[in-house]
Amino acid sequence: MSSYLAWSGTAPLDLHPDQSKGSDRRCCPCWLPLPKEFAEYAQPLRYRGNSRLLLRGWCVSGPADKGFFGWTFFMSLCMAWNFYVTILPHFLELDKSQSGQRLRLACEILGVVGLFGMLRAAFMNPGIVPRQDLTEVLRKCPEEWRDIGSGLPKPRYVVINGISVAQKFCSTCAIYRPPRSKHCAFCNNCVLRFDHHCSWIGNCVGLRNYRYFFLFISSTAILLGIVLWVTAETIRRDTEQRRADDGFLAILIVLIQDPILLARGLYFLLALGIFVALALLTWYHITVIAVNLTTNEHIKDYYEGIDGDRHNPFDERGWLGNCTQVCCQPEKLPRGYWSYSEPRNMLGSPPSDY
């Protein structure tokens, strides 16, 4: 069973003795097995989310009407074709040195890595939590644990390394959301370690596909940096013999007079805009990985205490440990003691806004 999935029980204090401490289970950096609980849930008669499932849940994509993955993939192919087929070969004709061949190899590797990361992030199960039957859950729930107004089970609290984290009951999935999970309004699923729903890849980004999403944006940002330099260098060399001076206006006049150079100039501007966006996004995710936060947690300041201090129970005591946990061992629970506690003992706890 997934370490996080073990904390989605439906009873108010549904804790087993072997779950009282954070797991030290080592996950393979390249392979994350699909929990058997979801394989059983991913049946046509049982599954109720909006995401589309293939291969019994191994392949998952978001709702077709709430994503732009088709446009993302099409734009990526068009830009890659223009660079690898027209711009890069022309640059290698101008620069026949050995460094040019090494640059070509680097571009090809980054392109393959970026495509791999994009497809894995877009079609991998992000960590969907199986639903339960709400009627059966309410039947077993004691009256004293129900909210007077809604009739649903009250939030329960997990103490992680001395810090209480609220678990809100999801009325749609009929479960207590595991720590760091959230119900996605687009996919209509609770997702483990929910980061955000990315419309550009058409899927949620969660525990199982976050590292592939980060691989996609970071490798693409690096590749676009190289694309910008190669494109600018080809434009500079092609206009060198045809412009009166080195000024920007002289280069612009030559670009307007030559349709091919003009197209490369427009391509440069498009690549520049995407590069800036991806570079900023990559830097943002580097910062949240370094402190072991998700985008959802960072935006909501979920672990900000009543005294204004931040107390993140998932911090692995340093940026290196956090990067290792997020990128190589995403299912590993944080070190330390985990236990349940009744709500009345958790005054001043973080709000249950997951």
Image (cartoon, rainbow, N blue to C red):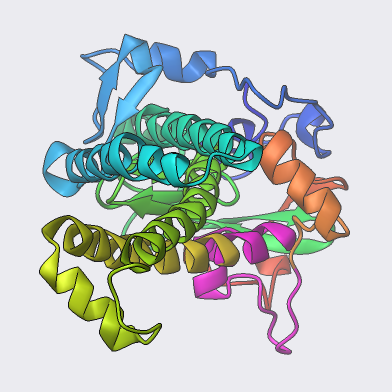
Q: Is residue 250 above or below residue 281?
A: below
Residue drawn at (87%, 60%), measured in percent from left and top? Answer: 318
285 part of magenta stretch: yes
Residue drawn at (43%, 69%), measured in percent from left and top? Answer: 276
Q: Position of residue 248 (x, y in %)?
A: 33, 85
In the foreground, 324 or 23: 324
Q: Is residue 337 above or below residue 231?
A: above
Q: Position of residue 86 (x, y in %)?
A: 29, 40
Whether residue 153 is visible here, answered yes or no, is no
Q: Position of residue 75 (x, y in %)?
A: 22, 45
8 part of magenta stretch: no
Q: Is residue 77 above or below residue 34?
A: below
Q: Is residue 270 above or below residue 7?
A: below
In the foreground, 337 or 239: 239
Residue drawn at (72%, 63%), measured in percent from left and top? Answer: 164
In the foreground, 110 or 332: 110
Q: Position of residue 127 (x, y in %)?
A: 48, 33
- The tally of labels here is 0
Magenta residues? 284-311
